[in-house]
Amino acid sequence: MLVVIANDLPPAVRGRMKLWFIEPRPNVFVSGVKDAVARKVVDYLHDHCPRESGLMIFRRIPETPGYEIRGIGDTRRDLIEISGLQLVIEKQILFGPLA
């Protein structure tokens, strides 16, 4: 399985993605392509998307934890790895001195 979330894709890339993926929301693509095809799609995205595209790619892998997350450009979310587990930081709360 492959899930791609983008801030903005070039029209040619978006059109090509629609060949293999469903697009449940604008710039959110989901597909059950095989692992070999998923690697080719990820390579294609790396080669044809500028950093402004802001891609976050979730790919199924056969090793633990079962997925890999990659980010390209400004994804508007940060990735963190804790004990080998990749996670997406939704919101950072900064605590300051209490008044």
Image: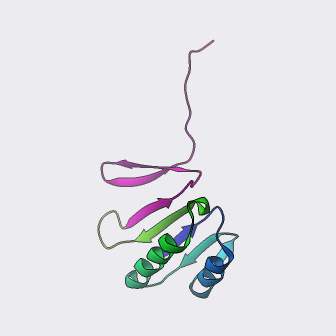
Measuring from the top left, give residue 35's x and y in whole percent.
39, 81
Q: Give the side of residue 39 with respect to residue 52, left or right.
A: left
Task: Give yes or no for residue 10 being in the magenta stretch.
Answer: no
In this view of the protein, which residue sits in the foreground, 55 or 20?
Answer: 55
Measuring from the top left, give residue 73's x and y in whole percent.
54, 57
Which stretch appears magenta? 67-93
Residue lying at 56% horizontally and 60% vertically, measured from the top left: 51
Residue lying at 61% horizontally and 84% vertically, measured from the top left: 16
Residue lying at 44% horizontally and 52% vertically, measured from the top left: 87
Snapshot quadrant of residue 95 = top right
Snapshot quadrant of residue 86 = bottom left
In this view of the protein, which residue sits in the foreground, 7 or 86?
Answer: 7
Task: Give yes or no for residue 89 being in the magenta stretch.
Answer: yes
Q: The C terminus lies in which quarter of the figure? A: top right
Q: Is residue 46 above or below residue 87?
A: below
Measuring from the top left, give residue 10's x and y in whole percent.
65, 72
Q: How many marks?
A: 0
Residue sitting at the far bottom: 19
Query: How was the colour assigned to the protein in this rendering?
Result: rainbow
Residue sitting at the far top: 99
Q: Give the side of residue 83 with respect to residue 38, left or right.
A: left
Q: Is residue 86 above or below residue 11?
A: above
In this view of the protein, which residue sits in the foreground, 5 or 15?
Answer: 15
Measuring from the top left, give residue 33's x and y in whole percent.
47, 84
In this view of the protein, which residue sits in the foreground, 20 or 10?
Answer: 10
